[in-house]
Image (tube, grey):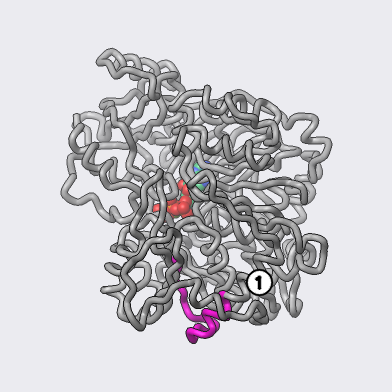
Amino acid sequence: MVGKKSGSVDTLLIEKRIISPPQSFRENARINSRKQYEEMWRKSIENPDEFWGEMAEEHIDWFKKWEAVEEYSFQDDVFVRYYRGAKLNASYNCLDRHLRSWRRNKAALIWQGEPLEESRTFTYLQLYREVCKFANVLKGLGVKKGDRVSVYMPMIPELAIAILSCARIGAIHSVVFGGFSAEALRDRLLDSKANVLVTANYGMRAGKLIPSKTNVDLALAGCPDVKNCIVVKRVEKDCNMVEGRDQYWDDLMSSASPFCEAEVMDAEDPLFILYTSGSTGKPKGVLHTTGGYMVYAATTFKYVFDYRDEDVYWCTADIGWVTGHSYIVYGPLAAGATSLMFEGVPHYPEPDRYWEVVEKYRVSILYTAPTALRSMIKSGDHWPLGRDLSSLRLLGSVGEPINPEAWMWYHYVIGREKAPIVDTWWQTETGGILITPLPGCISTKPGSATLPFFGVNPKVIRQDGSEAGVNEGGYLVITKPWPGIMRGVYGDPERFKNTYFVQYPGVYFTGDGARRDEDGYIWLMGRVDDVINVSGHRLSTAEVESALAAHPKVAEAAVVGYPHDIKGEGIYAYITLKDSVELTEELRYELTMHVRQEIGPIASPDVIHFTSAMPKTRSGKILRRILRKIASGDIDQLGDTTTLADRAVINDLLNTVN
Ligand code: ATP
Ligand code: MG
């Protein structure tokens, strides 16, 4: 029920369902008792040097070992350092490390193109050769350790090859989503001060060709420092090539040597820059370094996905998002896994495309986002039910809070009750997963990311900094670093400190709201910026949305506050309906009553706005800051819209304003 403590967020939605790991899964899991998890977690917090020293020995090959493991300050002069003085190379760990064993002939990357008939497989040895070749191409263009190389590409193998090649020679890669506009690309090229760009002539999306190179030309008109542009021919079709600047990938690769010594990198040398999704404002250029990031990516990959050599692992994210960096490329390849890379989208050519891929490759671990799940729920269950999904043994979710109904659908319709679900909470800034169940030992509750990963000590605090009580919503902070934490905002040291360490000195401020329940489970409640203040009650958008999405006719809900004369803020709900549902006036009433019943009258929406689609980032997150502007009638200043996946959605929304 609604509480009224000042500065905390009211908890309205209490989910009671608990699902234990299936016996068959638990028996073979890497960690299969809560006690074992707790012992390891305690050690990771009480003795981080020993814990992260052991993980580093086990998961990574080092050219030189460290003098100290963990050193940091979260106060005043904020800094974080792991593995002082140690030397390694990230690409070496993803490739060379496996060439000594039978894994050299194991599939490292399986690529499925958008066209059904297009696919390619690279063994570790083959991938190694391609990476060495492209590393030599980059060297030939004068790229050196520390230089920034920007990558703007569709989801094709050359994207993975390009970033591993950068890592091989110590260049810092900055991947920009292949679907971004010229403007978004230009901003990121300028911000990262890149002087080489790797791209493709075209991209493919839902059967249509996207003129990537045309965007590139527009962007590069404003980036005089980009001296070289390398173009992969995704399709046999000509594109504009600028003499002296642009060269085709194949032409450069044909004469490149397949041997390239891996550059010896310091543990704290930068590995990449990656921009956040821009859900809450201007994207931040997050900088990650080599040693801690690699240890963290490899360790989380192994334990969270309970990874085995025989798994076929598929993360559906785009590599332009941090999930693709850590869990398509670096984590899985460091672990010697078979990582599937997919160019297509969930609904093309039919709404069962994901399930067709799972069936074709016998995927055993699937890691996807709530946005994809909700879009598939919208299309109807007959699509997944028509496919053989029996190979799936573990399911993952990332990117947004997963509403309990979508969770249950994932559990029944996709996992068929035998695959545990790991709802993984993390951020671009965190480098890897921070809060997640370990699938063999933690009972799950639909909608909760459950418990911290090793080395992670989260706390939920009130506005005044005191610790929130059980089920009391507050701000999620992390009290100490973990190896994968970002080391800075590229080119803006003050922004790093001011964004994450100033509000509450001494802890890392995540910007997300959360509560901890009576079992210590963490429930994410949406962004701190998105809390709605209705007549003095501070409500979490995620909870109101979950209540709306639990209605059988609703596919997706997004809730924001807007100025309200009496209540201070009113609740404005954007709703998309399932495909089979007809929109009627009664439905508005029905949904309002439904929310009243589920979580109480305080949360019932003042406005319901039916829309065919939500404005989303390329990583599939709903852009509530834009919805908030539309709800308040503030439509002239929508803020940074360059991170939108599809700008047409905005016009649709404006045309249907209530
Ligand atoms: P910006 O920081 O530019 O506003 P962003 O926060 O959306 O963009 P990302 O780093 O891609 O950029 O996303 C991290 C955020 O995604 C988290 O802070 C959280 O709000 C949300 N998130 C990710 N995974 C989960 C999850 N499992 N449950 C709830 N929220 C999640
Ligand atoms: Mg963020």
Rendered location of residue 283, percent (x, y): 38, 60
Residue 325 visible within the image: yes
Amino acid tagged 1: Arg
Q: Residues within 10 Å of mark 1 (few under 14, many from 20)?
A: some
In the rendered structure, does residue 138 fall within the stretch colored magenta? Answer: yes
Reply above or below: 84 against 496. below
Rendered location of residue 175, percent (x, y): 46, 64
Rendered location of residue 311, percent (x, y): 73, 46
Residue 496 visible within the image: no
Query: Please, what secondary structure does the residue beneath circle 1 have?
Result: helix
Where are the magenta residues, as a range?
134-151
Residue identified by numbered label 1? 129
Identify which residue is drawn at 65% across, 42% down. Answer: 361
Reply above or below: 544 against 625. above
Q: Is residue 84 left or right of residue 191?
A: right
Reply above or below: 271 against 33. below
- Asked if ligand 1 lies within 8 A of label 1, the reply is no
* Front-lying residue, 470 or 637: 637
Q: Is residue 550 left or right of residue 603?
A: right
Which of the image's four quarters has the C terminus? top left
Identify which residue is drawn at 68% across, 63% down. Answer: 295
Locate residue 365: give its quadrant: top right
Reply above or below: 99 against 621. below
Identify which residue is drawn at 33% across, 42% down. Answer: 615
Q: Is residue 404 left or right of residue 190?
A: right
Locate residue 224: give its quadrant: bottom left
* Front-lying residue, 613 or 178: 178
* Front-lying residue, 1 or 217: 217
Identify which residue is drawn at 34% across, 66% down. Answer: 239
In the rendered structure, does residue 450 fall within the stretch colored magenta? Answer: no
